[in-house]
Image (cartoon, rainbow, N blue to C red):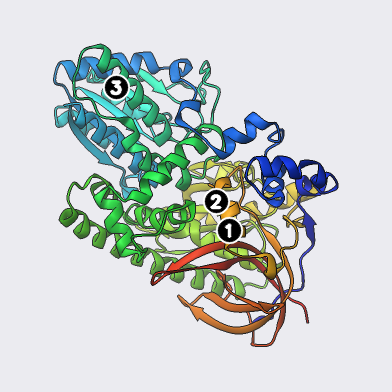
């Protein structure tokens, strides 16, 4: 069992460091905004210019009225006209979504909103075994079902073959997506994607669920002008918008912050039977207000689980459920997939670490590739995160399917390495590659996997030689927070700043030294501790830390995020450890 590492290089967050000398100057402003100075410091260190009073007030009190109108979003006019035409003529409308949370929530939003307008809907979500995106087979199934119009959610922008199939059958398509637009524009009647050329909507960070919300709101306005009565309120779908937004890890700023804040309020009311049933399965008490952590770490992994193995249909059916009885049965099925996901993830991580430990080259590589037969392709990405935590290197985990002659893998980065660029350097070996700087996916012929092991290592090394940092160049934090200052009042101060996430990171504070009072291992790989400092003791969780040797009485340092946890009617402050090291 390895010892805890020594203290990492620590760096006070640049924005905090710049503000500290001026702290007395904005103490009065903090009071006017009903924040502690440390709360305003937290906000100002992440959002440049937010000390301007109107901007700070908008951030702390985000209102739906602050949302910018979608009139400048390219494709909106055509989409509204086509959907109104379809509803007026009673067309059956097909809706297809990707198999992740954004795809499933987008499909649920579109299908249930259109049904509430009186449309006949046929909805489906992707099957991992069928491949990425909107497939030709899916397009044909909609045509055979008699659909006269098809909408795609969180996919479609690059699915040219499937779009051509529908075009050949004279079935128009509206694409609702947020992925990067390729040089070849999709063959669709309307493309709603903020990233397309000519789209003047100022905020480009929406996920597909956010785009779908805007479409539904605009469609309601159009139907009202057309004289339709008893129209649904699009705000009733904000819970799903928040779920898709947080789980797809788009920036939680501007429009996304507004939509997520209001969506969290709605989620906490637990109106949707599927959400209510899934929270019960996850043992989240019914009186606990939901925050972004419940979405990202409780609901999201469960809704993603079915699509990691095959079709995401159980997750879609759960979110569309209309009764508690239906929802409870579906939540049990989704929870079963989630347990399978956990087991598969553990197996892949353990086997991958064993393979790497047996290879003497592993410790010397700049970029790691580990492959094995019949790993569940849907969990190799989250397993790659575990390998990165151990080796502190960019890692590509690959599942080999010899029956198909195909290997499929997911990469995760470390430091400043661009794993998408590294895989592009390996392009001659690959069938397909896509993703972004921090995470990417590939498929390739099985016989080319050994070449990819060396090529990926060389591609990462080339970035390092060019000056790109392979490891962390100092872990940024928001300053030291003594345990005596950490109480419910402090946590209440953080609440107006939520939601935290991409683009507005949760606070990470320094504990320079604490004593370990007790330890425990749970779920076989996570470490629970009781930490004491200056007469205060807090429970702490170090995810993935069970492999380290930590004993009662040890002196440790940590970087942590404080959070509230409710259990059996009692709410208490706990610490989520980002880093843990020995101070011995």
Q: Nearer the viewer, residue 457 or 75?
A: 75
Q: Between marks 1 and 2, how big is the CA–CA gap?
A: 7 Å
Residue 495, disc: 2
Q: Residues within 10 Å of mark 1 (few under 14, many from 20)?
A: some
Label 2 close to label 3 by CB (< 8 Å) = no
Q: Nearer the viewer, residue 211 or 171?
A: 211
Label 1 close to label 2 by CB (< 8 Å) = yes
Mark 3 lies on residue: 220
Give the residue at x 39% y 59%. 402
Mark 1 lies on residue: 491
Q: Position of residue 327 (x, y in %)?
A: 21, 54
Q: The N terminus lies in which quarter of the figure?
A: bottom right
Nearer the viewer's eye, disc 3 or disc 1?
A: 1
Q: Nearer the viewer, residue 349 or 315?
A: 315
Q: Position of residue 65 (x, y in %)?
A: 46, 26
Q: Residue furthest bottom?
A: 552
- Would residue 160 appear left or right of 184 to someone viewing this image? left
Give the residue at x 27% y 58%. 277
Q: Between marks 3 and 1, how big is the CA–CA gap?
A: 39 Å
Q: The C terminus lies in which quarter of the figure?
A: bottom right
């Amino acid at each position: 069992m390895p010892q805890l590492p020594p203290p990492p290089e620590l760096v006070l967050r640049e924005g905090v460091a710049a503000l500290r000398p001026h702290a007395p100057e904005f103490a009065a402003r903090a009071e006017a905004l009903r924040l502690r100075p440390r709360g305003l410091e937290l906000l100002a260190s992440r959002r440049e210019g937010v000390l301007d009073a109107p901007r700070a007030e908008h951030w702390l009190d985000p209102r739906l009225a602050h949302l910018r109108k979608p009139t400048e979003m390219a494709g909106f006019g055509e989409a509204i006209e086509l959907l109104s035409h379809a509803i007026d003529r009673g067309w059956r409308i097909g809706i297809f979504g990707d198999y992740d949370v954004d795809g499933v929530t987008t499909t649920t939003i579109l299908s249930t909103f259109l049904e509430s307008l009186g449309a006949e809907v046929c909805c489906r979500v992707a099957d991992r075994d069928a491949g990425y995106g909107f497939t030709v087979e899916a397009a044909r199934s909609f045509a055979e079902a008699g659909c006269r119009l098809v909408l795609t959610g969180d996919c479609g922008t690059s699915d040219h073959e499937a779009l051509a199939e529908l075009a050949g059958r004279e079935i128009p398509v509206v694409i609702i997506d947020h992925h990067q637009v390729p040089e070849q524009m999709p063959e669709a009647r309307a493309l709603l994607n903020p990233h397309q050329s000519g789209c003047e909507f100022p905020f480009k960070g929406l996920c597909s669920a956010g785009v779908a919300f805007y479409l539904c709101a605009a469609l309601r306005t159009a139907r009202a002008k057309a004289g339709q009565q008893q129209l649904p309120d699009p705000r009733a779908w904000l819970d799903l918008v928040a779920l898709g937004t947080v789980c797809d890890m788009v920036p939680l700023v501007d429009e996304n912050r507004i939509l997520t804040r209001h969506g969290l309020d709605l989620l906490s009311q637990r109106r949707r039977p599927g959400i209510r049933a899934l929270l019960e399965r996850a043992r989240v008490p019914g009186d606990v207000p939901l925050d972004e952590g419940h979405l990202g770490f409780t609901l999201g992994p469960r809704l993603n689980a079915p699509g990691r193995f095959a079709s995401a249909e159980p997750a879609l059916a759960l979110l569309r459920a209309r009764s508690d009885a239906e929802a409870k049965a579906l939540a049990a099925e989704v929870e079963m997939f989630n347990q399978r996901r956990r087991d598969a993830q553990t197996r892949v991580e353990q086997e991958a670490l064993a393979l790497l430990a047996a290879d003497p080259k592993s410790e010397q590589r700049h970029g790691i590739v580990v492959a094995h037969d019949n790993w569940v392709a849907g969990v190799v990405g989250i397993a790659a995160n575990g390998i990165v935590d151990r080796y502190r290197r960019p890692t590509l985990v690959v599942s080999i399917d010899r029956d198909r002659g195909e290997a499929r893998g997911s990469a995760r980065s470390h430091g400043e390495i661009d794993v998408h660029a590294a895989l592009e350097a390996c392009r001659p070996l690959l069938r397909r590659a896509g993703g972004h700087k921090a995470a990417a996916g590939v498929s390739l012929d099985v016989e080319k996997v050994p070449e990819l092991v060396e090529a990926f290592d060389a591609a990462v090394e080339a970035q390092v030689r060019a000056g790109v940092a392979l490891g962390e160049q100092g872990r940024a934090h928001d300053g030291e927070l003594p345990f005596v200052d950490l109480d419910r009042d402090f946590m209440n101060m953080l609440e107006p700043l939520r939601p935290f996430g991409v683009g507005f990171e949760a606070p990470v504070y320094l504990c320079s030294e604490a004593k370990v009072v007790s330890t425990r291992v749970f779920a076989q790989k996570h470490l629970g501790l009781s930490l004491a400092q200056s007469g205060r003791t807090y429970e702490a969780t170090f995810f993935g830390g069970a492999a380290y040797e930590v004993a009662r009485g040890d002196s440790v340092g940590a970087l942590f995020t404080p959070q509230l946890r409710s259990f059996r009617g009692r709410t208490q402050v706990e610490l989520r450890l980002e880093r843990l090291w020995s101070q011995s």
